[in-house]
Amino acid sequence: MPGPGLAIVVKGFPRLSETFVARELAALEARGFDFTLHALRHPGPDAKLVHNPVRAQPRYLPEYLHDEPLRVARAFAAARRLPGFGAAWNAFRRDWPRDIGRARLRRLGQACALALELPQSVRHIHAHFAHSPTSVVRYAAKMRAVSYSVSAHAKDIWTTPNWDLAEKISDAAFVAVCNRTGAARLADLGDPNKIHLIHHGLPRESLSSQSHAQSRDGSDAQAPVRLTCVARAVEKKGLRTLIAAVAMLPASLAVELHHIGGGPLLDELRALALRSGVAGKITWHAAQPYAQVVAALDASDLFVLPANIASDGDRDGIPNAILEAQGRAIPVLACAAGGVGEAVEDHVTGRLVPAGDTKGLAAALAELIASPEQRAKLGAAGFAQVRDRFDAESGYDRIAELLRERAG
């Protein structure tokens, strides 16, 4: 039998924050694709929490070149005999003056390993994320004289230099983007005809089959309104703003906030909650597997995500956590940053306030806490939107069609 015509390269696998990647890969397998899977990084500590239905076993490239010097040296020596090595080397030489550093050398070394380790049957390579995975894939595709494509998401779109994105779009067969704001940025940097807006969406089996009852209004200390935030503790999630907004709520409102997720800012946020006098209202949960996240959402009255634009320009696309909440008919209050506005239309499918607007977030929180009727209305509208506009299966069909044209 012929080998796989497609290879897929990801940054790390599996990763809890990128469960949507595993879902898409499993969907491609269900649509008949046979592919090899390659990752730049080994699994992190949260890998055990990921539901991974993908049959393809990941093959790990050298995470750091000095960890596997013999493998890298042999790959570089063998790659120089490939027909497209000259083209890859010329691309690297053009990139180097604009990005001098170990990271760029690492991408070249990883590309050599990838080019040598791909099955001979591979005709196309697809990279998830437009930063480091695509840098590796671009060089490797040139070495092997095959085509490549990209799925771009959020941080990779907003923190990768313009020149780098432009080069990658120029060489790629197509670029899939999961949010409108990111697609607009990439279309400004390259051929708009190559840019395809394909939302991640939500699997149909994730949708709640029952409407979510809303009754608590913050007046009963024994039945506080339950707020849930599922987000990594990083700058772009705006959790400092959320803590400040909770601290501004009237003391008469009975409320509790549950945060689910890990991240580097957790200690700082706990200290901020203590200084702000709201530590007793916040429960900090670690990162949780998907089933427990769903259970937490189903127990919630309101989902809150105060998205922000980080100091390095990083921002969310359409946060999957928002779609997950809407798919359970939980009303959403969010801040307008990145692609959040595609999923949350103010007073229609949720409530939306400007990014970083602490007073506005506190006012919207107080209003929604006191109004179970408004929460129920917004939750139902958000559910209908996810069901009708953010169906994951249609997105899987589109990416499959694009890949089939290249890889067979």
Image: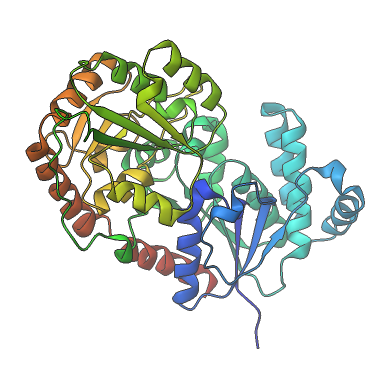
Residue occupying image coordinates x 21% and y 26%:
365
Question: Quarter-wise, where is residue 189 in the image?
Answer: top left
State left or right for residue 140 relative to residue 361.
right
**Residue 383, placed above or below residue 237:** below
The foreground one among 24 and 301 is 301
Expressed as whole percent of the image width and height from the top left, the position of residue 39 reads 66, 54
- Image color mode: rainbow
Identify the residue shown where x is 60% and y is 55%.
48
The foreground one among 404 and 86 is 404
Q: Residue 331: x and y, percent?
A: 20, 42
Q: Nearer the viewer, residue 195 or 302?
A: 302
Q: Position of residue 212 (x, y in %)?
A: 18, 51
Q: Is residue 151 left or right of residue 205?
A: right
Picture quadrant where residue 357 is located: top left
Residue 197 appears in the figure = no
Question: Which residue in the rendered view is the most extreme toward the bottom?
Answer: 1
Q: Is residue 332 above or below residue 273?
A: below
* Horizontal side of residue 389 vs 219, given as left or right: right
Residue lying farthest left?
Answer: 373
Tell which residue pokes out farthest to the front in this image.
222
Residue that appears at 76% across and 64% down: 117
- Whole-percent x, y for residue 169 in the image: 50, 45
Q: Quadrant of the N terminus?
A: bottom right
The answer to whether 205 is drawn above or below residue 42 in the figure is below
